[in-house]
Image (cartoon, helix red, strand yellow):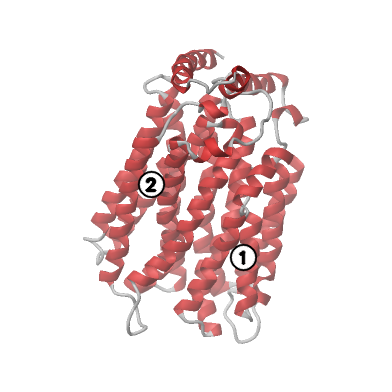
Amino acid sequence: MCFLGFVACFFLRVNLSVAIIEMKKDFGWDSKTSGIILSSFYFGYAITQLPFGVLAAKYGSKRVFGGGVLCASLLCLLTPIAAYHKQSLILVRILQGLALGGSYPSAHAMWRKWAPPLERSKLVAISWAGSTMGTAFAMPLSGLLCENGFWSPPHQSKWPSVFYVFGGFGLVWCLAWFALVHDSPQSHPRISIEERDYIVSAIEEEHCLPKNERPLPLLHIFMSPAVWAIVISLFCYDWCCILLTSVMPTFVDDVLRLDVTENGILSALPFFAMSVFTVLSGWIADGIRKRQLLSTGGTRNLMNSIGMFFPALFLVVLNNVATETHAVIICLCLTAGVSSMSASGFLVNMLDIAPQYAGFLMGIANVAGTLSAVLAPYSAEAMASAPSGSHILQLQWKNIFYVTAEIYVFGGLTYLILSSGRVQWWASDGLNQSRENGKPANSNSIYEEEEEEEKSLLSQESTL
């Protein structure tokens, strides 16, 4: 259900990226207007990240995640009407961003209670894959609906059906979500006793994890190098993802000159690759940990490095084959697919370093990701604006891909330097002990103890 929830979220987010190609023709919007409309979603999206992360931890992820998709789906159904006034459309997109801002933080808050440590990478990766799978299906379906939709106002193309189909999918998912999903194993009425006891015991035994909720240690969170490693990595990762999501249809239109249906299909291929590699990375990471080939921190560094450095290389190659359609497709698929392997690096790492505050950390990181989502389309517009108002030149697109490669390298190096695979002292019982003793906790001694505890945990859970 979490996987399908992210499919629904990205149906609601991405459909406009393809539909706007036809909407521009109907309403006479220029590239600046369409850029503002596409970016408006992220202004709302950034605002609710942190509040929803806190609310999900306090009141439950079920309400936050499900309620957000419900509101965004209803707004999606209103989009064809709002589109007649661009100010109304911008408002609807901002409100959709506000509604969906809690999706990732609430999902992380839920996995904190549902994901045993040695299954964490797989479970988070599978649910995360819903976002790329949603994008992969949204793009070609949007293109098909724009040309062959079932209803449209007079003298317009079929693009309104895009919003009716995806909005309806979101409503159906909400019905299933509220009927089937529960916030924790303890509150689930149909779970077996064996499964419930296994999940609860595995999570409670992890790395001095506190049994009770505590106030957020905000100062320690914002001063933690491990937190900043995650934040910077998500910023860099989202930069590429947003470029692929928002401007890939424009790139295909400018450079490869395909019609809207072919455009949607081709633009979707990198996201199918991302879905496959995301799930694959989860199995690989958990397999490495179960066999004790690397520590948790080593595993996260390996997966994150693969997901950052190799895509940078593929983007450089892409700039040298930009005139060959098939080579472009292969490079784009490799770039997007391999980059998603970092999901088993920085993304799961939030649950490693501070399980109790994973939803809040996801909110912090996603604010940075949203910042890149706002900046990336504008930077692309600035670097690849056509002076004559016609198609953007291939040379200008090369500048965009070179900058993106540099951002990837920066993110990979930063994560290697700052990241950690251990529960941080401010997120463990060490914080309570230090307060009781009236002195700061010795973080180094805590880390040494946690390293031994991690080996013991791996052995115990493998036996279970």
Q: Is residue 360 left or right of residue 352?
A: right
Horizontal and vertical percent for residue 21?
Answer: 49, 75
Locate the C terminus by quadrant: top right
**Residue 193 percent coordinates (x, y):** 72, 20
Q: Which residue is mark 1?
A: 94
Q: Secondary structure at mark 2?
A: helix
x and y percentages locating residue 229 in the rendered image:
42, 40
Precedes in sequence: disc 1 or disc 2? 1
Mark 1 neighbour class, 10 Å CA radius: few under 14, some 14 to 19, many 20 or more: many
Q: Residues within 10 Å of mark 2 (few under 14, many from 20)?
A: many
Q: Residue at x 47, y 15 (%)?
A: 449
The residue sitting at 46% across, 17% down in the picture is 445
Does residue 281 appear anywhere in the picture? yes
- The amino acid type found where label 2 is placed reads Ser
Q: Along the line of sight, which residue is nearer the eye, 348 or 43? A: 43
The answer to which quarter of the image holds residue 228 is top left
How far separated are the C-alphas under marks 1 and 2?
28 Å
Q: Amino acid at mark 1?
A: Ile
Name the residue tied to disc 2.
339
Which of pointers 1 and 2 indicates the residue nearer the eye?
1
In this rendering, would 93 be left or right of 463? right
Task: Say which mark, if any, is on residue 391.
Answer: none
Q: Do the residues under discs 1 and 2 have CB atoms within 8 angstroms?
A: no
